[in-house]
């Protein structure tokens, strides 16, 4: 049932952001999707919660961290359909501080009738895996259900990709 965190690992420029955009586009009919792009190390828990509420088109201004969290919890738990879920995609997740990763873990733990309400996909460089090895993030690391690694195209794959793009452009 869609529980656990998905981790997409790749070097800079390997296509992680593009893949995330394609996934959210493909899944937008079955899941409400929110993408947090261009994350940086200065993002706080409060800013994370504000960004998620903004992505859901819910009020996020003038509230403290606790009010933001309660507002999001209320939204996630009130839906009548037990199958409803939100896909939260976090790009550049390797830049997030451990406290913000912990907030994401707590969001991923929200469920109704045993069904997860938030499905997490983190896109990052390999440095996130190193950070997740820290004892303070053991709980988060244990929730990773899927790890996918993007690798660079070889010469033949690159030629095929460029040729296909040229053909599609006419």
Image: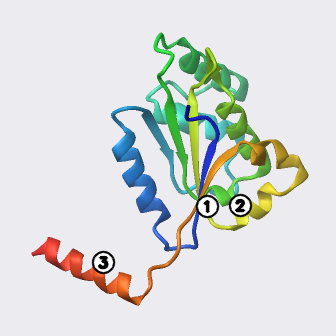
Q: For the residues marked 3 and 1, what is the alpha-carbon distance in whole angstroms? A: 23 Å
Q: Which residue is mark 3?
A: 161
Q: Position of residue 154 (x, y in %)?
A: 44, 85
Question: Nearer the N terminus, badge 3 or badge 1?
Answer: 1
Q: Position of residue 163 (x, y in %)?
A: 23, 82
Which one is nearer the viewer's eye here, 159 or 135?
A: 159
Residue 158 quadrant: bottom left
Earlier sequence position, callout 3 versus callout 2: 2
User: Of 60 and 70, which appears nearest the observer?
Assistant: 70
Mark 3 crowd level (few <14, some 14–19, many ≥20, 10 Å Cα): few
Of all residues, the one furthest to the bottom in this rendering is 155
Helix, strand or loop at disc 1? strand
Residue 33 image point, x, y percent: 44, 37
Residue at (55, 73) in percent of width and height: 12
| Furthest residue in direction front, as rendered | 1
Q: Can you identify the residue that label 1 sits on?
A: 124
Identify the secondary structure beneath mark 3. Answer: helix
Q: Are marks 1 and 2 in contact (CB under 8 Å)?
A: yes
Q: Give the answer, above or below, for where 38 lies relative to 150.
A: above
Instruction: Give the foreground label among 3 and 2.
Output: 3
How many circles with numbers are drawn on the protein? 3
| Disc sitting over residue 128 in the figure | 2
Seen at 70% across and 29% down, the residue is: 65
Q: On the rendered structure, is 125 left or right of 52? A: right
Report the colour scheme.
Answer: rainbow
Verify CB contact (< 8 Å) between mark 3 and mark 2: no
Q: Check the picture and name the quadrant holding the C terminus.
A: bottom left
Q: Residues within 10 Å of mark 1 (few under 14, many from 20)?
A: many
- Contact between labelled residues 1 and 3, with CB atoms less than 8 Å apart: no
Q: Position of residue 138 (x, y in %)?
A: 84, 47
Q: CA distance from mark 1 to mark 2?
A: 6 Å
The answer to which image quadrant residue 15 occupies is: bottom left
């Amino acid at each position: 049932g869609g529980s656990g965190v998905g981790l997409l690992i790749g070097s800079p420029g390997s296509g992680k952001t593009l893949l995330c955009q394609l996934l959210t586009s493909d899944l937008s009919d079955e899941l409400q999707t929110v993408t947090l792009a261009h994350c940086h190390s200065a993002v706080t828990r409060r800013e994370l919660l504000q960004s998620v509420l903004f992505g859901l088109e819910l009020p996020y201004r003038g509230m403290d961290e606790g009010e933001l969290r309660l507002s999001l919890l209320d939204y996630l738990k009130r839906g009548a359909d037990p199958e409803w879920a939100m896909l939260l995609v976090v790009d550049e997740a390797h830049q997030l501080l451990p406290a913000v990763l912990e907030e994401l873990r707590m969001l991923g733990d929200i469920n109704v009738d045993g069904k997860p309400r938030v499905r997490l996909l983190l896109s990052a460089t390999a440095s996130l895996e190193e950070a997740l090895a820290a004892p303070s993030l053991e709980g988060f690391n244990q929730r990773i259900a899927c790890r996918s690694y993007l690798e660079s195209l070889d010469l033949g794959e690159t030629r095929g990709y460029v040729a296909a793009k040229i053909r599609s452009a006419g």
